[in-house]
Image (tube, helix red, strand yellow):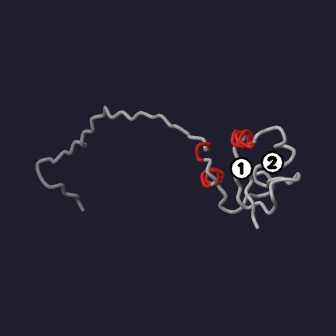
């Protein structure tokens, strides 16, 4: 049976998130870290630190942003805005071709 971390929303905890167990994804120690800090605040701190996997290697294909979206916290996924401006004030002229007065002959 799997449980969901109440902080990072990781859905494959092998234990109920309590009793000083530690989430391998976000590193929250349940019963300690969340004793005086709300889960939403711990989640915000985890995201601010880059939402990195906490213990050993993450599962293959793991994506923290998709995890948050699928867990119902899409609004907490950072949005990156890129501002750019493209300007096309260039005139392109074809190369000049010298057609000459007759066929080009290459001497042998």
Left or right, 2 with respect to 63, comes to right
Tell me whether the residue at label 2 lies in contact with that at label 1, contact meaning CB atoms closer than 8 angstroms: yes
Q: Earlier in the sequence, mark 2 or mark 1?
A: 1
In the figure, is residue 108 to the left or right of 10? left
Q: Residue at x 79, y 38 (%)?
A: 37
**Can you give x and y, in whole percent of width and height, for residue 26 in the image?**
76, 49
Residue drawn at x 61%, y 55% as measured from the top left: 70
- Residue count near mark 1 (Cα–Cα under 10 Å), binned few <14, some 14–19, many ≥20: many
Percent coordinates x, y for residue 83 in the rendering: 47, 34
- Work out whether residue 9 or residue 51 is closer to the camera in this orientation and state it: 9
Q: Nearer the viewer, residue 50 or 68?
A: 68
Specify the quadrant that holds the C terminus.
Answer: bottom left
Residue at mark 1 = 8
Residue sitting at x 19%, y 57%: 105
Q: Quadrant of residue 106?
A: bottom left
The quarter of the rendered structure image containing the N terminus is bottom right
Image location of residue 51, percent across then percent down: 70, 46
The residue most toward the left is 101
Q: Position of residue 104 (x, y in %)?
A: 18, 55
Quadrant for residue 89, please give it: top left
The span from disc 2 to disc 1 (Cα, nearest Å) is: 9 Å
Hey, which residue is sitting farthest bottom in the picture? 1
- Label 1: state its secondary structure: loop
Q: Is residue 67 above or below residue 42?
A: below
Residue 16's tag is none
Q: Is residue 52 above or below residue 58?
A: above
Q: Residue at x 52, y 37 (%)?
A: 81
- Quarter of the image for residue 40 reads top right
Provide the secondary structure element on which disc 2 rests: loop
Q: Is residue 100 left or right of residue 10?
A: left
Q: Which of the numbered marks, if any, corresponds to residue 28?
A: 2
């Amino acid at each position: 049976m799997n449980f969901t971390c109440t902080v990072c929303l990781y859905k494959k905890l092998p234990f109920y998130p309590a009793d000083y167990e530690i989430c391998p994804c976000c590193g929250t120690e349940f019963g300690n870290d969340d004793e005086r800090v709300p889960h939403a605040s711990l989640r915000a701190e985890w995201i601010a630190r880059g939402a990195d996997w906490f213990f050993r290697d993450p599962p293959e294909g793991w994506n923290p942003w998709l995890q948050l979206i699928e867990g119902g916290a899409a609004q907490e996924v950072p949005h990156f805005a890129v501002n750019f401006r493209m300007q096309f004030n260039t005139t392109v002229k074809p190369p000049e071709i010298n057609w000459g007065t007759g066929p080009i002959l290459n001497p042998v």
